[in-house]
Amino acid sequence: MERNAAVTVEHLRMTYGTTVAVDDVSLTVAEGEVFGILGPNGAGKTTTVESIAGLRVPDSGTIRVHGLDPVREHDALTRVLGVQLQESRLQPKITVREALVLWSAFYDDPEPWPELAARLGLDTMLDSQFRNLSGGQQQRLSIALALVGRPRVAILDELTTGLDPRARREVWDLVRDVRDRGVTVLLVTHSMEEAQSLCDRIAIISEGRVRALDTPDGLIRAATSATVISFTPGAPVDLQALRELPGVADVRSTSGRVTVEGAEDSVLDVLAALSAQGVTPASLRVVDGSLDTAYLDLTSATAHLAEELA
Ligand SMILES: Nc1ncnc2c1ncn2[C@@H]1O[C@H](COP(=O)(O)OP(=O)(O)OP(=O)(O)O)[C@@H](O)[C@H]1O
């Protein structure tokens, strides 16, 4: 079933003086999905999501959030969009309770904040001032503030940065809960693990452009060196024949062990070729592709392209 678009971005462009922060970004986020934005430092991720939130005015391009223009219809936007930004912009002396009460007052039908605070482990520090919270606690408060208005779309920018592993998993569970309630989540992250575990689809952005947009599995499949096969050949092996197999990106032989990198589908071809050569692959290991490899593949392909164009 084709889902409605919650967010559409068409040809977004944003510059700061001579710096091109976002060159040309187009993407559509479907209602109810967790959509990840991944990319190296300075790729333009924050500029993109802050433009979606109406906090920056793009040079050109069109953005709609449930049909609303984030700049011209900003008031209406704040009723459908919750934002947890990279840097919290709270008064240093505001307490956790005051912030939650204040934010709740902005909305007609807020989430009961004590429950949300408990869910995020903030209930024991309601009277602490923002400036005295640890980085992880500040992070959790800003997530709570993004969700308290029951937004239809939540933007979470580097939501688990600074959290310890347990807190991180708890926040992931919270994001899944939020998604299960039908909220669309736009997630900016540097963590492949986070993207792979939470996102339905991911856009990889670098140098202000979308370089790939697919499901985590789709990105991994598309990467040329997603799977690594290694073995100790029981007889001399024709490495060139392996190199020529479709989907194989690289073949190396070191210290009597052969390593083949290739697309996921190349494993069976490699095994069939070895069998045809009468070679038994002893101590066979197949390491599955990860989003890490796919990401490096896609972003280094961009770097190569940039070098070629330079
Ligand atoms: N307010 C600003 N003034 C000037 N330049 C800016 C401003 N905000 C961002 N930039 C520049 O625009 C580019 C994109 O920045 P942006 O913060 O969107 O990237 P990012 O992908 O979110 O990076 P990171 O992963 O480091 O947070 C960078 O070169 C950055 O230095």
Image (cartoon, helix red, strand yellow):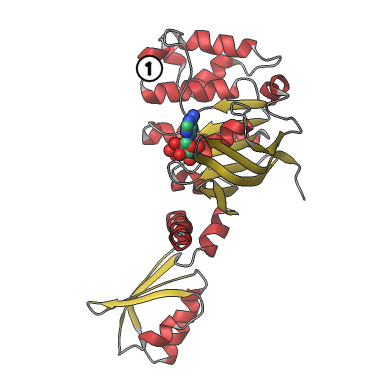
The kind of secondary structure element at disc 1 is: loop
Query: Seen in the image, is 73 located left or right of residue 213?
Result: right
Instruction: In the rendered view, tell whether residue 255 sits above or below residue 302.
Output: below
Decide which of 47, 110 is in the foreground and name it: 47
Decide which of 197, 184 is in the foreground and name it: 184
Instruction: In the rendered view, tell whether residue 243 sits above or below residue 295.
Output: below
- Residue at the spot of label 1: 133
Image spot of residue 223 (x, y percent) = 50, 63
Query: Seen in the image, is 191 located left or right of residue 280?
Result: right
Query: Seen in the image, is 103 located left or right of residue 40?
Result: right
The type of residue carrying mark 1 is Leu
Instruction: In the rendered view, tell whether residue 98 sits above or below residue 193.
Output: above
From this viewpoint, is residue 78 visible?
yes
Residue displayed at 51% across by 79% down? 246
Image spot of residue 182 (x, y percent) = 68, 35
Q: Residue furthest left?
A: 255
Instruction: In the rendered view, tell whether residue 173 sits above or below residue 238.
Output: above
The answer to which quarter of the image holds residue 163 is top left
Q: Residues within 10 Å of mark 1 (few under 14, many from 20)?
A: some
From this viewpoint, is residue 158 visible?
no
Residue displayed at 46% across by 75% down? 248
Quadrant of the drawing holding the C terminus = bottom left
Residue displayed at 40% across by 92% down? 277
Query: Seen in the image, is 18 located left or right of residue 107?
Result: left
Image spot of residue 192 (x, y percent) = 45, 48
The answer to which quarter of the image holds residue 233 is bottom left
Image spot of residue 247 (x, y percent) = 50, 75
